[in-house]
Amino acid sequence: MNRLDSMKRVMDITNRSYISGTHELDDIYKEMFAFANEMGKVKEIVGYFFGSEYMKDSTFDYPNLQTTDYYNKQVEEVLQYQDTLTQGRTI
Amino acid sequence: MDLLVVKEAMSKNKGLDQDFQENVLELVEIFHKTFPEVDLKNLCQNLKTLKIEKTNRFIQRLPLDYNAKLNKLTINPKELEKVKDTKNLLMNIVIRLIATNNGMTGFDADGSFLALNIGYIAGIANMLVGNSEDHDYYTDEIIAANLFGKIVGDEVLKEAFFQNNPSLIIDRVNEGE
């Protein structure tokens, strides 16, 4: 799969979730992780999860947490979580 | 662009009452303080010919909706009565009016970015005026838009949105492929 295919999957599932109102957020996360992998941006996505309460209310305010030990620990945990999400998928 | 130009544009539309004009102007001022670089010429153009129509829940489930192709705002009065935070709702509409050019809103050219467009608009509205609703209509879409912003870059999304140019997103994704 390449970057554009991966992005298309994100778009398709997000649009379907929006139009049908089925709130397929878990599936959107999975595709986002795959897309982040393609773009080499997994850490940014992990950062999003870590700061999601901030991000929900703001597109631009993003806490600068990259230097903290706590952040690094979160990265490790979410990367493990990502492995379970993408298991069995062809990326 | 001076906000007086926006006021003047609205005054040319007999279909917009005084309350609506004042509310829109207040929200445009808030928007303009945060995004002074965003051109308001689309907004002025759209406000001059904006049509407002009432509808019911059989036609439209949302309290307010904007059809960019027809430049028409439809209001569902019964649903609107239930809304606690009408300021946030109207800010959503103002952002759409600012980002709509020739019937295209933001980076949603052909429906492929539909949900992300909705999430992006709702995210900006929340950022500008907050949101005191118990239930956010577009929580999933906001989360998805923010995740996407982390991958391709917030600046890319912003530029693509206000320039009605989804190819900026595609180009960013293609970089380094």
Image (cartoon, coloured by chain):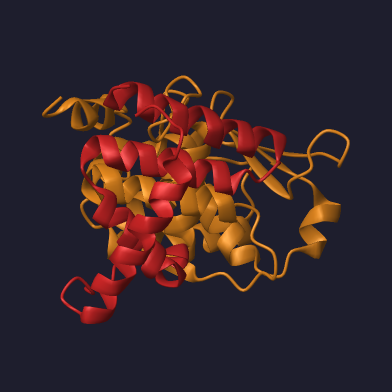
- At x 32%, y 45%, the residue is B40
Residue B111 is situated, as x and y percent measured from the top left of the image, at 51, 24
Which residue is nearer to you in this view: A41 or B101? A41
Q: Which residue is depicted at the point 40% across and 51% down?
A: A82
Residue A30 coordinates in the image, percent (x, y): 47, 43
| Nearer to us in this view, A37 or B134 | A37
| Identity of the residue furthest to the front in this view | A88
**Horizontally, is B89 left or right of A72 in the view?**
right
Is residue B22 in view from this perspective? yes
The residue at the point 58 percent across, 65 percent down is B87
Question: Residue drawn 49% across and 53% down?
Answer: B142
In-front residue for pair B80/B130:
B130
Q: Position of residue A85 (x, y in %)?
A: 47, 46
x, y (%) of residue B112? 47, 24
Asked if residue A66 is positioned above or below residue B45 in the image, the reply reads: below
Task: Note whether B47 is above or below A82 in the view shown.
Answer: above
Q: What's the colour of chain B in the image?
A: orange
Q: How many marks?
A: 0
Would you say residue B121 is visible in this rendering? no
Chain A: drawing colour: red
Q: Is A20 placed left or right of A41 in the picture?
A: right
Q: Nearer the viewer, residue B20 or A5?
A: A5
Residue A72 image-quadrant placement: bottom left
Q: Quadrant of the C terminus of chain B?
A: top left
With B111 as the anchor, is B28 left or right in this view?
Answer: left
- Toward the bottom, the furthest residue is A69
